[in-house]
Image (cartoon, rainbow, N blue to C red):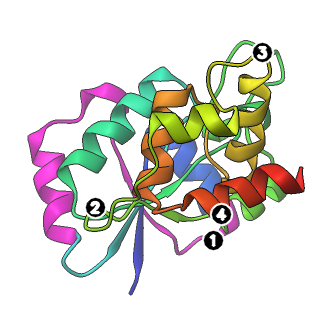
Amino acid sequence: MRKIYVVEGIRDEEILKKIDPNIFTIKTNGFSFDNELIEKLIELEKEYEIVLILDPDYPGEKIRRELTAKLKNPINIFIPQDKAISKNQKKVGLEHVSLDDLAKILEKEIIFDKKIKGNLNTSDFITLGLTGNVDSEKKRLIVTNHYYLPKSNAKRLLNYLNNMNISYKELEEVLNES
């Protein structure tokens, strides 16, 4: 199935087209997207896979959450924030990612299956040291890096992992390997 990449702006579109000139993209124009765009994506989802590749900042994550809630099962690609910083260190966005890094990032597709939910809970996170400990943030970073997820607090990481149907045993193995 062909893919449509949802990005925030024209510069994001331009950098993706440097990787593949035939890539099909749709811009949200930041927060200024409306129900018309959502309806268009819902219709396109019948024949295309929708891939969300948005900036690793608050607006990008807000757009991602809203589109994910409305779409059937979009594919997510998360951009590590340290790869998306402008040369002057003042801006963060897809357009600042090097072409080499972007080619690797595009391979890291994540599907949050809305039909299947994992059964991890807060108690599991406490037992594994992912919350409530001095080094919990460090452990969460190990997990987010392993699964190519954005840096997350415990609540958001728990949600991501359950949406990916990650088991306690698998999560324990990831932490033990580090």
Q: Closer to the camera, 174 or 105?
A: 174
Q: Which residue is mark 4?
A: 170
Nearer the observer, disc 4 or disc 2?
A: 4
Q: Which residue is mark 1?
A: 20
Q: Give the residues in magenta.
A: 18-44
Tell whether 44 sits left or right of 99: left
Q: Residue at x 84, y 23 (%)?
A: 87
Q: Residue 114's mark? A: 2
Alpha-carbon span between mark 1 and mark 4: 35 Å
The local crowd at label 3, few if under 14, some if 14 to 19, many if 20 or more residues have their Cα within 10 Å, is few
The local crowd at label 4, few if under 14, some if 14 to 19, many if 20 or more residues have their Cα within 10 Å, is few
Q: Which residue is mark 3?
A: 134
Asked if the residue at tag 4 contacts the one at tag 1, i.e. Cβ–Cβ closer than 8 Å, the answer is no
Nearer the observer, disc 3 or disc 1?
A: 3
Alpha-carbon span between mark 4 and mark 2: 20 Å
Q: What amino acid type is highlighted by mark number 2? A: Lys
Q: What amino acid type is highlighted by mark number 4? A: Glu
Q: Residue at x 89, y 49 (%)?
A: 178
Q: Is residue 9 visible?
A: no
Asked if the residue at tag 1 contacts the one at tag 2, i.e. Cβ–Cβ closer than 8 Å, the answer is no
